[in-house]
């Protein structure tokens, strides 16, 4: 006869600053880098209070819009069309993988 043993596992998330229990993950960003830290309610409030003036004066951006100001967005290119054009133009391109910058430059110049 096999005896089944019940097992209960508890996960306690502690504050990364002071080790107190009851912490939750908090994300924030600076200079294009996102950080995550586990903070108990008191330290989460302290962080929120400390950055509140900067949040109020800042602009919220969506996660997909993280590019330096003034940088154009990359346009979508039909890679199959580029490969077909390149072959017709006598350029060597692989069936898969990266298309060389030179082939892309020539394609852009022709279109």
Image (tube, helix red, strand yellow):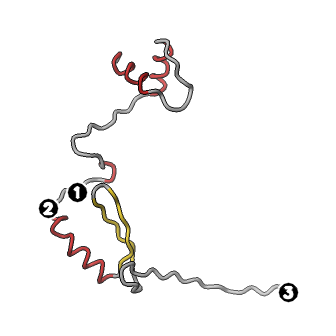
Q: Which residue is located at x 75 percent, y 85 percent?
A: 4
Closest to the observer: 56 or 2? 56
Q: Quadrant of residue 73 in the image?
A: top left
Front residue of 87 and 7: 87
Q: Secondary structure at mark 1?
A: loop
User: In which quarter of the view is residue 25 placed?
Assistant: bottom left
Q: Quadrant of the C terminus?
A: top left
Q: Quarter of the image for the N terminus: give it.
A: bottom right
> Helix or strand or loop: what does disc 3 sit on?
loop
Question: Which residue was labeled with disc 2?
Answer: 57
Q: Which residue shows up at 26% across the image and 79% down it?
A: 45
Neighbor class of circle 1 (other Cα within 10 Å; few <14, some 14-19, many 20+) is few
Mark 3 against mark 2, which lies toward the viewer? 2
Number of numbered markers: 3
Say the numbered circle drawn on residue 60.
1
* Residue 26 on image: x %, y %: 35, 70
Q: Secondary structure at mark 2?
A: helix
Q: Residue 47 at what x, y percent from top left? A: 26, 75
Give the crowd class for mark 2: few <14, some 14-19, many >=20 residues within 10 Å: few
Query: Mark 3 vs mark 2: which is more N-terminal?
Result: 3
Q: Residue 30: x, y in percent?
A: 28, 60
């Amino acid at each position: 006869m096999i005896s089944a043993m019940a097992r209960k596992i508890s996960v306690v998330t502690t504050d990364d600053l002071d080790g107190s229990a009851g912490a939750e993950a908090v994300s924030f960003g600076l200079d294009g880098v996102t950080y995550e830290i586990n903070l108990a309610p008191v330290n989460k409030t302290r962080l929120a209070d400390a950055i509140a003036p900067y949040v109020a004066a800042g602009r919220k951006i969506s996660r997909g819009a993280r590019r330096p100001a003034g940088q154009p967005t990359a346009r979508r290119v039909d890679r199959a069309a580029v490969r077909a054009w390149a072959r017709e133009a006598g350029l060597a391109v692989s069936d898969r993988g990266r298309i060389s910058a030179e082939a892309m430059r020539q394609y852009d110049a022709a279109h």
